[in-house]
Image (cartoon, coloured by chain):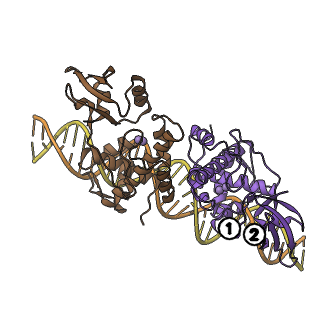
Chain colours: A purple, B brown, C yellow, D orange
Amino acid sequence: MTNLTYAEENYLKAIYQLSEEGKKGVSTNDIAAEMKTKPASVSDMLRKLGEKEVIEYRKYYGVHITEEGKKFALRTIRKHHLWEVFLVDKLKFSWDEVNAVADELQHIKSKILIQRLDEYLGFPKFDPHGDPIPDEYGDVRARPRLPLNELSILDTGQIVAVKDNSSAFLKYLDKVGAYIGARIKVLEKVEFDGSIEIMVDNKKTLFMSKEVAANILIMQ
Amino acid sequence: MTNLTYAEENYLKAIYQLSEEGKKGVSTNDIAAEMKTKPASVSDMLRKLGEKEVIEYRKYYGVHITEEGKKFALRTIRKHHLWEVFLVDKLKFSWDEVNAVADELQHIKSKILIQRLDEYLGFPKFDPHGDPIPDEYGDVRARPRLPLNELSILDTGQIVAVKDNSSAFLKYLDKVGAYIGARIKVLEKVEFDGSIEIMVDNKKTLFMSKEVAANILIMQ
DNA sequence: GAATGGTTTTAGGGTTGTCTAAAAATATAT
DNA sequence: ATATATTTTTAGACAACCCTAAAACCATTC
Ligand SMILES: [Mn+2]
Ligand SMILES: [Mn+2]
Ligand SMILES: [Mn+2]
Ligand SMILES: [Mn+2]
């Protein structure tokens, strides 16, 4: 049974998530940015993960995660999301406070703990940021989602997730009244800077920059 | 702000607990036994803990924990016990399953997490094994407790805690029907091997070896 | 007070994970 | 196709933690 250290679990989670975005091989630099380490440290780690066969590693050509690696990554992601649900639903944390704590909790090893936690939470399907929670077998029921900035005028939809989990971004969303589940309609798009105006819940309008819109995910 | 690693937190917790028992300086060998490491590793760690001033370390003469060190140890112990209560009360773990998981959870750093958890659990004063939970300020309301084997014939009392937290021991107690809160009376003591017979809850009698009795703590 | 036994520390080494600086490989631009 | 820029890897070092083997120390006993 391959055993992974905390650092290896973190790298693998990052690699999985980066590979979900790009679909291509994941680059050393991107991993370094995501992990807030230096590329030299990443190279070192990739060699080790390659030896453990959780990634396929061709020097200078980025990495691909293996099926085995995906299993590990999804297990960590599942734990991360379940703990986030626990913190918000049971301990009354707000959604901008949970990520850092879940980054620690996601490494707790007990299998039965996660099963019981899942049950205790009522088998949630999505975390507080709208991300789908993989089930016990690593199956993820992904919904088709689109960044808000890619919608066209008069398009409608529902906010189902956020891309950026930073406290600053989530607090900003709280302030302007954008939340998971809100129904939105695009009223205007500004050519010049990509900023847009949307109607929220048929009640109020909201201006936002392209950067903000790009981090809000919509299901149409 | 002194920052401690997981290993340092574990050593400090062990040193605190050993010093509570003996009242004297704690020996390198005892720490090694408790931590399941080698004396050489302990010496190394003691030097580091001494530099961080959480213990007073005189080579060859054992260690004493400082006030600062006590604070850290009690913080870890508080977290350990609170997580055990969570696992038993909320996630339906049995008392023999929680120690290993709590040994991991006790290192999670968020202060607000522990405050919220404490509140969520209803500010429990004792953990599932009867150990008092230090409050936010490190205050422990210790009850006077006596190992069952030190009671005399006809002495009465109540089981308030267990010394051994191993799964094997706790499962044995479950099997024979000894539990925290049970009222007991000593019916007989065998000179030869120190084994005793007790009456539990005025309902049934129970024989046990001296080893078992020594790990059951009584409040009279 | 010297020998002995047990305890503790030191010496030296291995693993994991990080870093900086330099070298090597790849990608891009003319 | 060659020069230049960018990315990635390697080399060498360091911190944390653990180990085994050997040396140093302490407490007893004769
Ligand atoms: Mn998160
Ligand atoms: Mn999340
Ligand atoms: Mn415990
Ligand atoms: Mn306990």
Instruction: Work out whether B2 lies above or below B30.
Output: below
Q: Are marks 1 and 2 in contact (CB under 8 Å)?
A: yes
Residue A54 image-quadrant placement: top right
Q: Residue at x 25, y 50 (%)?
A: B25
Work out whether residue B44 can be spotted: no
Considering the image in quadrants, where does the N terminus of chain A appear?
top right
Given residues D15 and B49, the one toward you in this image is B49
Q: Amino acid at mark 1?
A: Phe
State the CA–CA distance, disc 1 to disc 2: 8 Å
Question: In percent of the image, x 34 and y 59: which residue is there?
Answer: B50
Q: Which quadrant of the view contains residue B37?
A: top left
Q: Nearer the viewer, residue A4 or A197?
A: A197
Left or right of residue B170, residue A32 in this image = right
**Res B50 seen here:** yes
Question: Does residue B207 lie above or below C22 as drawn?
Answer: above
Which residue is label 1 attached to? A169
Q: Chain of mark 2?
A: A
Residue A212 image label? 2
Tell me residue C15's x, y (percent): 54, 48
Q: Position of residue B47 (x, y in %)?
A: 35, 57
